[in-house]
Amino acid sequence: MLAAENLTLQPEPPPGARADWTIDQAWDDYTEAEHAVWDRLFARQSALLPDRASPRFLAGLEVLKLGRPGVPRFEALSERLAGLTGWSVVAVPGLVPDAVFFDHLAQRRFVAGRFIRRPDQLDYLQEPDVFHDLFGHVPLLADPEFADYLQAYGEGGLRSLSLGALHRLARLYWRTVEFGLVSEPEGLRIYGAGILSSHGEALYALEDPAPARIAFDLRRVMRTRYRIDDFQQVYFVIHSFEDLLRQTIETDFAPLYVELEGLPDIAPDTLAPGDRLVEAG
């Protein structure tokens, strides 16, 4: 739930939210119609993803028991995650300020919206809802390497606030956590939550000839702008979750930010010199 580039958010929590922007999930308030939307979305995506999603995502989906009928309870998910990787899920009223977002991640707390989309919004919703957050993001928090990566990202985000480099970190999150692909022995697979929770983009990201699929490069990612109103024109492919974690931990980001300030941004639909294209399929 990191804000998009150039989006300004109010610094104070809204009425009813705690100082850290968390709220109660209020699970008992979900209607039968809202539970039915979850079940419909879950059935559609779980049928689509077995040969398209990362095996680690599919394993997390199974161990966390997200397929039970109705919107999952955050408390139950947190209990299962705590025993696996020490993470928990906390409800928030919507997009949260950057410092709040990073602090929750650094403390192994994943912030999730509690509302669910309407039946007429199954295929597109600009603001992330509980299906996107729980189905798309939470299964990989059961994986030790990805869980460590997201915590390291939160810690790096807190440091970036004093370095004027928030937009660089937002791009990294967008191109990995939200819209990342990973190279598996079976071929390219999806691990980004924005793709995993979208029926149309799950097909497009792997099978459509239009987008470019580029080998992950940290500097390239941090220079690349993104759009939030359409499918991606460029996807970045990591070699492995272990390699992504290693690069995050071993990189000194402060001098990297300085280096990147002297380089122009790259448009969301542009190939750049040095890009290594990765074959789909």
Image (spheres, grey):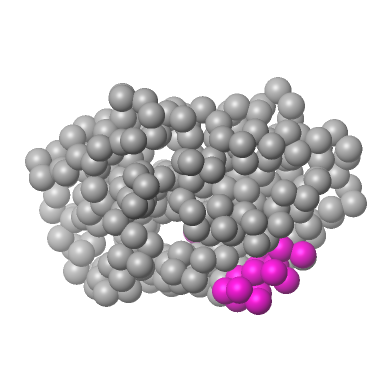
Is residue 115 visible to us here?
yes
Is residue 171 visible to us here?
no
Q: Is residue 146 above or below residue 202?
A: below
109 relative position to 218: left or right: right
Residue extent of the magenta highlight? 76-98
Residue occupying the far left of the picture = 273
180 relative position to 115: left or right: left
Residue occupying the far front of the picture = 186
Question: Residue at (31%, 36%) from the top-left corner?
Answer: 280
Asked whether 15 or 237 is in front, the reply is 237
Q: Count up the numbered dots.
A: 0
Magenta stretch: includes residue 8: no
**The C terminus appears in which quarter of the rendering?**
top left
189 relative position to 44: left or right: left
Asked whether 208 or 126 is in front, the reply is 208
Give residue 78's position: percent from left, percent from top.
Answer: 70, 67
Q: Is residue 40 above or below residue 239?
A: above
Give residue 263's position: percent from left, percent from top.
Answer: 14, 49
Quadrant of residue 62 within the rendered picture: bottom right
Quadrant of residue 132 within the rendered picture: top right
Asked whether 47 or 30 is in front, the reply is 47
Question: Residue at (65%, 76%) from the top-left corner?
Answer: 83
Magenta stretch: includes residue 84: yes
Give residue 88's position: percent from left, percent from top.
Answer: 65, 68
Q: Is residue 106 above or below residue 139?
A: below
Question: Residue at (75%, 39%) from the top-left corner?
Answer: 39
Give residue 175's position: percent from left, percent from top.
Answer: 37, 47
Question: Residue at (68%, 46%) from the top-left corner?
Answer: 130
